């Protein structure tokens, strides 16, 4: 995945610390996938592309992760949205900045925003 990013890219996912540079982004993804169930998969949908300048665009995306546990049980679906800034380097589009966060409908967000007694 790190190969989709520019060498100097930055990434902020949810409340995690910023990952600066391709090497840090690779480490973040390795850690993320190490925590996931092997049968979990992600679907990425691009909803809007806005060309800012030649070779620079902003994408609005959503992701849905789902799948089955090692025991065959359906895993809770997770929904997120994000904004990516992409740049064209040597004819290849790469992510220069990625921001992602759960949607309001995501169970984790609902649980954290519910009033506490």
Image (cartoon, rainbow, N blue to C red):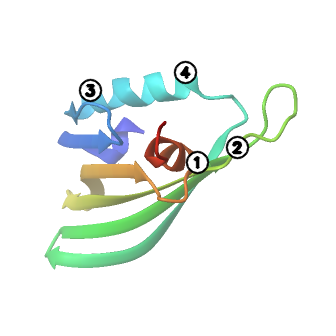
Taking the image as shown, residue 73 lies to the left or right of residue 82, namely: right
Instruction: Return the residue nearer the eye: 115 or 33.
Output: 115
User: Residue 54: x, y in percent?
Assistant: 14, 75
Mark sitting on residue 107: 1
Query: What secondary structure is found at the residue carrying circle 4?
Result: helix
Q: CA distance from mark 3 to mark 2?
A: 30 Å
Q: Residues within 10 Å of mark 2 (few under 14, many from 20)?
A: few
Query: What secondary structure is found at the residue carrying circle 2?
Result: loop
Q: Nearer the viewer, mark 3 or mark 4?
A: 4
Please name the residue shown 21% across and 61% down the image. Answer: 88
Q: CA distance from mark 1 to mark 4?
A: 22 Å
92, above or below 60, in the image: above
**From the image, which quarter does the N terminus lie in?**
top left
Tell me which numbered mark, 3 or 2, is placed earlier along the sequence. 3
Q: Residue furthest left?
A: 53
Tell me which numbered mark, 1 or 3, is placed earlier along the sequence. 3
Please name the residue shown 25% across and 68% down the image. Answer: 58
* Residue at numbered disc 2: 76
Please name the residue shown 35% across and 23% down the image. Answer: 27
Q: Residue furthest right?
A: 72
Mark sitting on residue 23: 3
Tell me which numbered mark, 3 or 4, is placed earlier along the sequence. 3
Mark 1 near mark 2, Cβ–Cβ under 8 Å? yes
Mark 3 near mark 4, Cβ–Cβ under 8 Å? no
Q: CA distance from mark 1 to mark 2?
A: 9 Å
Query: What secondary structure is found at the residue carrying circle 3?
Result: helix
115, above or below 104, in the image: above
User: Residue 70: x, y in percent?
Assistant: 81, 25
Query: Could you tell me if residue 9 is visible in this image?
Result: yes
* Residue at numbered disc 4: 34
Q: Nearer the viewer, mark 1 or mark 3?
A: 1
């Amino acid at each position: 995945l790190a190969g989709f990013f520019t060498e100097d890219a930055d990434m902020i996912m949810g409340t995690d610390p910023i990952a600066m540079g391709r090497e840090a982004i690779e480490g973040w993804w390795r850690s993320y996938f190490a925590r996931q169930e092997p049968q979990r998969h992600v679907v990425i949908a691009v909803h809007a592309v806005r060309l800012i300048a030649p070779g620079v665009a902003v994408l609005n995306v959503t992701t849905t992760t789902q799948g089955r546990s090692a025991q065959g049980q359906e895993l809770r679906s997770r929904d997120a949205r994000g904004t990516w800034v992409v740049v064209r380097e040597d004819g290849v589009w790469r992510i220069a900045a990625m921001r992602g966060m759960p949607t309001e409908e995501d169970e984790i967000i609902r649980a954290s925003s519910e009033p506490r007694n």
